[in-house]
Image (cartoon, grey):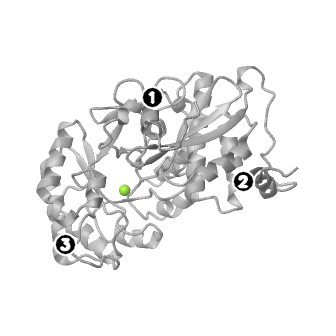
Amino acid sequence: MRRPSYEHLVQDVLGEGVWRDLGEPLGGRGGTRDIEISGISSFVVDGNFPWNLIVVQTDAEVYGVGEAFTGPVREHIKFLETALIDHNPIDVARNVEHMNQVLSGIGGSTGYAQAAVSGIEIALWDIAGKLLEVPVYQLLGGKFRDTVEVYKDCHAGEPLLAASAGDGASMYGPEQYQAVAEQTLDEGFSSMKFDLDVGSSSNDTTHRRLSGSEVDQRVEIVRAVTEAVGDEAEVGFDLHWNFSVETALEIARAIESFEVGWLEDPVPPESVESHRRVARGTSTRILAGENLTRLEGFLPYITEYTVDFLAPDIQKCGGLLEFQQIASLADVFGIPLAPHNISSPVGTIASVHAAATVPNVFALEWHASEVDWWDDVHVGPPLIDDGRIAVPEEPGLGITLDRSVLDDHCSPRESIPF
Ligand code: MG
């Protein structure tokens, strides 16, 4: 009989007599901890981005939820399900290593393969915590803080979709930014971020350059926002990988005299050296890293002091354990972290658990202010209170999803597997 293709591929990838063969499930511990993964599935909810929610089912009463970074992860989830069926979900590190063993020889150490690993790993932690009746942060070694500071992504002073659909150059001036900065302070945030890359008068932006007057426009936005917040908040500005080294440096140097928390992703993400040139050419602090995966991806950014701050995305970088390793090495080199986060409450609360367990996180992103039902997805009060999220004390991730709200916002033809 023909074997299912992914099962066949997993067996082929691992081969016979592989050195680090983790394909054989471990059992034998007895009691309620002797459980097996019975299925892994995903569904998409239409939030500020399409949210990839992951569900890991077991042969016991307990299941876990996780979230993978937005984008095409479903085939990776199906592939990894084949590798993990019958394995004990609470051996989280072993399961992650098994997934990475299966993926590494077929180019899966980066990109959406690692987003899938991240989402599954989060769900495994949720299972382990529920089964052992402790919060995920406790399983990860305990917490450094009871609440995690959240910085609000204010886009360009307007919701993201409106900004990208409109003529940014004329729609967004310093006054609009300033008004949103003041409103965000009123909401209790002491950290926030704005897009500084919207709108250009040029009809050719492929050269990644700005004119002197366009740089001046951005300086006026920075002036307006930093004057509005004074010393009441830290403010970052995001350039979304849009500029050449020369233009990025021109912007970074032009805003050096303002109280800017950080300038984010000034140049395309593929080149370590271009980041280093920008960071070393300005006193403005440079933040990057949301597109990097696994510790090896972060190595040159950490060990060579390429940027000032790092922003691992916990739904993408390889999971909570991988995040801890990245944070730990960054701490050795004196580099603070502000994790990137554009996810639903599931990914956000997973990020809170992880961020609580390392010393060098100073803020976690929140990117969904335009989704007015964001907090309806979970049962209970809003997650963010006065600009911070409390680290949950309930077992697992400590978040209970509202099935009817998920149903209302599920992508067409998606089904929720619980
Ligand atoms: Mg960003």
Could you tell which of marks 1 and 2 lies nearer the N-terminus? 2
Dots 1 and 3: beta carbons under 8 Å? no
The residue under the point 63% across, 25% down is: 62
The residue under the point 55% across, 24% down is: 134
Callout 2: SS = helix
- Looking at numbered disc 3 in the image, what kind of residue is underneath it? Glu
Where is residue 363, by image quadrant? Answer: top left
Q: Which dot marks residue 404? A: 1
- Looking at numbered disc 1 in the image, what kind of residue is underneath it? Ser
Ligand 1 - quadrant of the structure image: bottom left
Residue 308 at what x, y percent from top left?
37, 59
Can see residue 226?
no
Nearer the observer, 233 or 213: 213
Structural crowding at the residue carrying mark 2, measured as other residues with C-alpha within 10 Å and reported as few (<14), some (14–19) or many (≥20): many
Q: Is residue 196 above or below residue 210?
A: above
Q: Is residue 290 above or below residue 28?
A: below
Residue 46 lies left or right of residue 135; in this view the side is left
Where is residue 297, by image quadrant? Answer: bottom right
Structural crowding at the residue carrying mark 3, measured as other residues with C-alpha within 10 Å and reported as few (<14), some (14–19) or many (≥20): some
Quadrant for the C terminus in the image: top right
Could you tell which of marks 3 and 2 lies nearer the N-terminus? 2
Residue 381 at what x, y percent from top left?
35, 25
Residue, disc 3: 214
Q: Is residue 358 above or below residue 201?
A: above
Distance (Cα) linking label 1 and label 3: 47 Å
Distance (Cα) linking label 1 and label 2: 36 Å
Can see residue 253?
yes
Structural crowding at the residue carrying mark 1, measured as other residues with C-alpha within 10 Å and reported as few (<14), some (14–19) or many (≥20): few
Q: Which dot marks residue 102? A: 2
Callout 1: SS = helix
